[in-house]
Amino acid sequence: MSPGPLVVIGDALLDVDLRGNSRRRTPDAAVPVVEDADVRHRPGGAALAAWLAARQGVPVVLIAAVGEDAAGERLAGLLNDTVALTRLPLCGRTPVKTRVFDGERPLLRVDDGDGRAAADGPADRVLAALEEARAVLVSDYGRGVAELPAVRERLAACAANIPIVWDPHPAGPPPVPGTRLVTPNAAEAGVTEGDSAAGLERAAELARGWQADAVAITLGGDGAVWAGSGGKGGYLPAPPVGPADDVCGAGDRFASCAAAALGDGADTAAVVGEAVEAASRFVAAGGAGAATTVGPMTGALPMGLSEGAVEVAERIRRAGGRVIAAGGCFDVLHAGHVSLLRRARALGDCLIVCINGDAAIRRLKGPDRPLTPLHDRIRVLTALECVDAVAVFDDPTPSALLERLRPDVWVKGGDYAITSLPEAPVVSGYGGEVVLLPLLPGRSTTGLVTAMRATGR
């Protein structure tokens, strides 16, 4: 397995949700009036697929055409410190898709932005990213990136050596020959969601026509079927998830999980099974709408593996449990950190670790820190049994994140004083408690870094 990043290539969008409540209709047109709407922004299209993969702790590079406009800058800001964005030129305005909800009921969607990928200049940047990739996901939303000659040439050249997952679009081009897995949905494949037998036959036919190793057709709540060009394949039903209010992003979750699993060396059957499970959990948790936060996502990114930090906190509270959160940089994880986190977890029913983003650490510690990048820190922390979820903040303090998580207890190391914590008033303001736990003597990140540099390690 290559240690490099997952590279996502495709069309990035800005998604906006307006969620309010309608209690009346306008007298002039008898249409619902949505009042006190809560505005939520999130990455869309290929950017959502990249962000969802990054939530798994996978290092991700996104290559996408993003406009130099307000929507494009907002989209880039949402990905900051989570996904490494390589911007290609865009002709026209950054695409924005706005959904309007009455409570949980969708009323309409408004699409804006005519932007398409420009033909000039992507070759060198695509080549540089692919040279280090462990796997590639082509997330095609019909906006032109997947049909750029330079992109297709580079993808075709590396298809034999790097696993490629291709999530197609009706308005986009076919996958390049040698693609490891193509993931159309039932409508794109021309089959009925409930007809797994026809789906198997169609998947094999598409695999042969596209010269792909395999095709997996997603069947919504029925799971997925997959087949190789030689006909080998199978049906993988989805676990029951109950009523689904919002399935937006399920296909992106399926494709991003499949690409990450292929990059880890899994075979096709295991990849499709894992992707079905991941997409089902995603829908059960509320879909893309539940994975966002009000305002910019940097500063309050949910970063759990199968659940976000906010979802974990809300689930524990609904069950009557006690939510614990602890914070720090956790740049070089050592015995003192592990001891602190284990003792923090013993104070309640879940532990959410709030960590500084890379940019925040640079501001705190200097330009040569962190030693361990964000995604590696997330993967190490989530591997600890005592950690239930990880959340990232890039603000100077975790106050905004704590206001959203509202843990019953906020834990810091004993080298702080409560009066010196700028977030302490926030915690006490909603009725929470700040607890300082003593540190193990002789253990500190600064000491370890100094010792390593002194010995040249």
Image: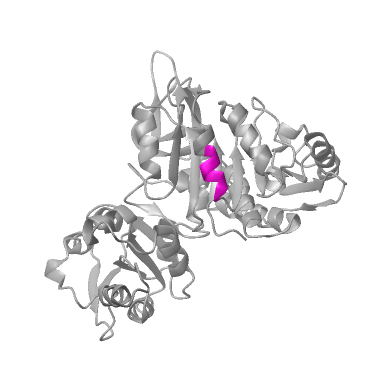
The one of 257 and 112 positioned closer to us in this rendering: 257
Count of number-bearing discs: 0
Seen in the image, is 407 located left or right of residue 156? left
The one of 378 and 452 positioned closer to us in this rendering: 452
| Relative height, residue 170 to residue 159 (above, below) | above
First to last magenta residue range: 126-132
Residue 101 is at least partly visible in this image: no
Residue at 42% x, 22% y: name it: 93
Seen in the image, is 188 located left or right of residue 327? right
The one of 446 and 403 positioned closer to us in this rendering: 446
Give coordinates of residue 141: x percent, y percent: 58, 31
Give coordinates of residue 286: x percent, y percent: 51, 48
Characterize the magenta stretch by its predominant secondary structure. Answer: helix
Give coordinates of residue 339: x percent, y percent: 35, 81
Looking at the figure, which quarter contains the N terminus?
Answer: bottom right
Residue at 64% x, 33% y: name it: 153
